Image: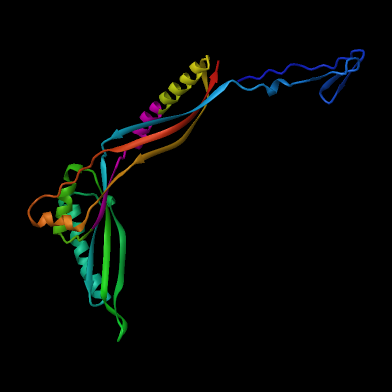
Amino acid sequence: MKTWMKPVSAVLIAGTLLVGGTVMNGALGLSQPVYADSDVQKNVVNVTGTGEISIKPDVAYLSIGVQTEATTAKEAQSANAAKVAKLNTLLKDTWKIDKKDIQTGQFYVQPNYTYSEKEGQKVKGYTAVHTLQVTYRDLDKVGQLLDGASGAGANVINNITFDTEKRDQFEEQVIQKAMANASMKASAIAKAANRQIGVVMSVTQSSNSVGVYTQNYLMKEMATADSGASTQIEAGEIKVNTTVSVTYELK
């Protein structure tokens, strides 16, 4: 928006004196303030627009692992490693999951303690834990995959997170909805003020997010695998949203 500045020239009038931006009339003793054009308020309206869409997820992130207890740390780690190797083979060979989609999430071996007043604190064996972060895209078979992993020795399944790998595609859609929402608000404000909105002066995208959906998968649910029933996992929907701050010219 252009701001026009009028040239100011000094004018000498008999009987008047210009002091500190105020014209003093010697004859009448009156004062008149002088204003600069830059003090005039700009004609703009600022609004915030939001956009949101619900979509079906296209990828699942699974945390699958094995926990083993033994008398010594070496025994616990060795037994656990054998089970994780079997699980890895299942994921790669049976379920055709690429090795780039399988990553170690947690690995540790820790002592287990008991306490009594007579003997105090004593080590009672060791626990080894090794979890894998698995990226899986055939969402209709997630339940079957978990049942297969359980059969291969997996006894640690923390949760399942559903997400999308097409964030850029959906971001464009929510931005368009957010801008339409901002335009509607600005038009309503202008109409109420008996004005009209003009061109967009500036736009700022304040936030953009994909609301992932996480299911907790408790070990007790894995009993269905023993009964012959397949575990049912529902992917549901996730939400993609964004917020924009827009400044419009007000005519």
Bounds of the magenta segment:
157-177
Identity of the residue furthest to the bottom in this view: 118
x and y percentages locating residue 133 in the rendered image: 28, 54
* Image position, residue 78 (x, y; %): 23, 71
Instruction: Tell me residue 227's x, y (percent).
Output: 7, 55
> Who's the residue at 16% across and 56% down the image?
222
Residue 38 visible (yes or no):
yes
Q: In the image, what residue occupies the spot 22% across and 68% down?
A: 68
Question: Which residue is more in the foreground, 29 or 64?
Answer: 29
Coloring scheme of the render? rainbow
| The magenta stretch spans residue 170 | yes
**Placement of 170 over or under 235, stated as above or below:** above
Question: Which one is in front, 173 or 33?
Answer: 33
Which image quarter holds the N terminus? top right
- Choose top left, top right, bottom left or bottom right for residue 18: top right
Whether residue 149 can be seen here: no
Specify whether 100 is left or right of 9: left
Instruction: Name the one closer to the observer, 234 or 92.
Output: 234
Residue 36 painted magenta: no
Q: Is residue 191 left or right of residue 31?
A: left
Q: Is residue 191 above or below residue 90?
A: above
The C terminus sits in image quarter: top right
**Picture layout, residue 45 above or below residue 102:** above
Residue 166 appears in which quarter of the rendering? top left
- Position of 173 relative to 192 (above/below): below
